[in-house]
Image: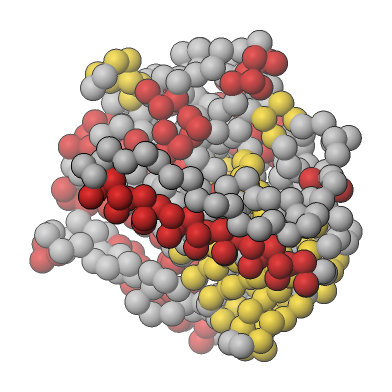
Amino acid sequence: MRRLLLFSAFIALLSVNTFAADAKNKNNPPAPGGYSLDLSRYDFIDTTQNVIKFPKGNASFNTFFNKLDTLVFENRGQVRILHVGGSHLQADVISGRIREHFIKEYPGASAGRGFVFPYSAARTNTPASYASAYKGIWDMNKNVQREIKKPLGLLGIAVSTSDPRSEITLLLDKYNSTPMWGETKFRLFGYSDAGDVVPVLKVDSNEIYGKLDSASQSYVFTSPRPIDTIQIAFRWIDSLKQAEIAKFITDSLLQDSIARAKEDSIKKANGDTAQKKVPEPAKIPNNVALPEVARDSMFQGECDVLDTACLRREEAKSKSRSCAEKLGKPVVNYAEGEIDSTNYANEHCIAEQTAESDSVKKNARPRFTLTGILTETDAPGITYTGVGINGAKVHDYFEEVCPLLEKQLAFYKPDLVIFAIGINDANVERFNDKQFKGDYDKLIARIKKVNPNVAIIFETNNDMFRKVKKKKYVQHPNGDVARKAFFALADKYKAGVWDKFGIMGGLGSMAKWEKADLAKADKVHFKLSGYNLLGDLFYKAIINSYQEHIANLPAEKRKE
């Protein structure tokens, strides 16, 4: 009974704080963790629409709500939530805000951070809720590329390396004023082509080797203490060869930097007229495959998480012309903001699986491919994982692109999935809503293989404008068409709908969000304040749905 009273007090406090006018903070918005909003400034937002709508009732949410009951009333068990989308989710601002609410406000404990990834090694933006860094040379594959060379999993992205110096680091509390994370269990999904390199977890001065689960292509690590920094190094079975090649690469870099410094000095002294001098090459060890490029980096990602112009340029680089030619489809100049003339159902080229792997080629170095890291604890609580790749469409999570999805999802087994994929599907001239719903049917079937009783919420697309020429935008009616498709899907799967399109104010409302300094000038993405506001609204909607469930519980159960 005491826990119920505390929960009721929390709900009341949330309702007051989240939507109370706070004139003092107009010029100084609250820091993360503070949820006071002055919605009187945003009269274009339709807060009456801010509910989870259930076209066929909420019976399919009984299992999810019952698991929350066990957590709320008995402080037992874990509840897992999965939020899947595109660039809105890779940035992890709206999803990060929702996660923060769940963990900080109630029940006050986390069951782990969920899936994370070293996005910087893939040369793309790391989610805003944590930081990543890397050393060494890494290759990248992600599900929005036309040519897929590596089998992908739940996250839709992979990085691989044959650099003996390679490391990755994930700083989970980098941007938290108060630490939120203390993880003890890690499952690293990845594999070595020839079994000649393994990942190790570095904690303090210790290197911890994981237990290989070959069936799931993963390594299980247990930290001797809770940590919020995940540092992974990669150890070759042939440690002497690893040390030899690492020394060679380091020496090459040093010689190259000295030669460049001398060359620059000569050019400066001679008015930039000196002939270019080529440094003598370093002595190459026998039977050593050289790296493609001699470089090292603690690269943090070329784009800021909300720099949409940079993200479009990055996305353009991922489009393969040779693959497009194989498909007989035009190459789209995404960097200039153009869009597909239609939404192709199959725009991927999958690399031949029979091709000789890198690690069995003559003199090749050991190679490791990483597809995701799942962090966990044994504590009761909520785990909230956001999955998103810039530019992703529904069919980018199909089996031929992400064959490892179910295998990895089985270790997470979400109780609730929030589907927010659709903004890129609808950003076309001719939107095929029938195909869109069919694509979702295939994706949902994959999720239900893992958990047949999973609760589903569809998040409708935000309103957006279409760029027709430089600095000229027009309203894009596909947002409303997609909205109707989402409701049809909710009807079919007895799911819920969070109508973001309606809450925003409907067609053309993005212009008002931009004017209110909530959206970016590209009229597709939001600013930090806009994402945070959407996160607050969604959290209130889902909590209100759960509050209604609590109110309808039998009196004897509520008193337990």
> Foreground residue, 424 or 103?
424
Q: In x, y percent, where is residue 201?
A: 67, 76
Question: Image check: 48 left or right of 544?
Answer: left
- Decide: is 304 above or below 381: above
Question: Image check: 235 left or right of 212?
Answer: left
Asked whether the viewer can see residue 386, the reply is: no
> Foreground residue, 446 or 373?
373
- Decide: is 520 above or below 418: above
Q: In x, y percent, where is residue 300?
A: 44, 57
Q: In x, y percent, where is residue 119?
A: 53, 54
> Foreground residue, 345 or 250?
250
* Residue shown at the point (70%, 16%) measured from the top left: 326
Q: Quadrant of residue 25?
A: bottom left
Q: Quadrant of residue 492?
A: top right
Q: Quadrant of the N terminus?
A: bottom right
- Decide: is 103 above or below 281: below
Q: In x, y percent, where is residue 227?
A: 56, 81
Q: Quadrant of residue 355?
A: top right
- Decide: is 423 above or below 404: above
Total of numbered circles in the picture?
Answer: 0
* Residue shown at the point (64%, 42%) measured from the top left: 141
Question: Image check: 519 left or right of 334?
Answer: left
> Foreground residue, 466 or 162?
162
* Residue shown at the point (42%, 71%) measured from the top left: 174
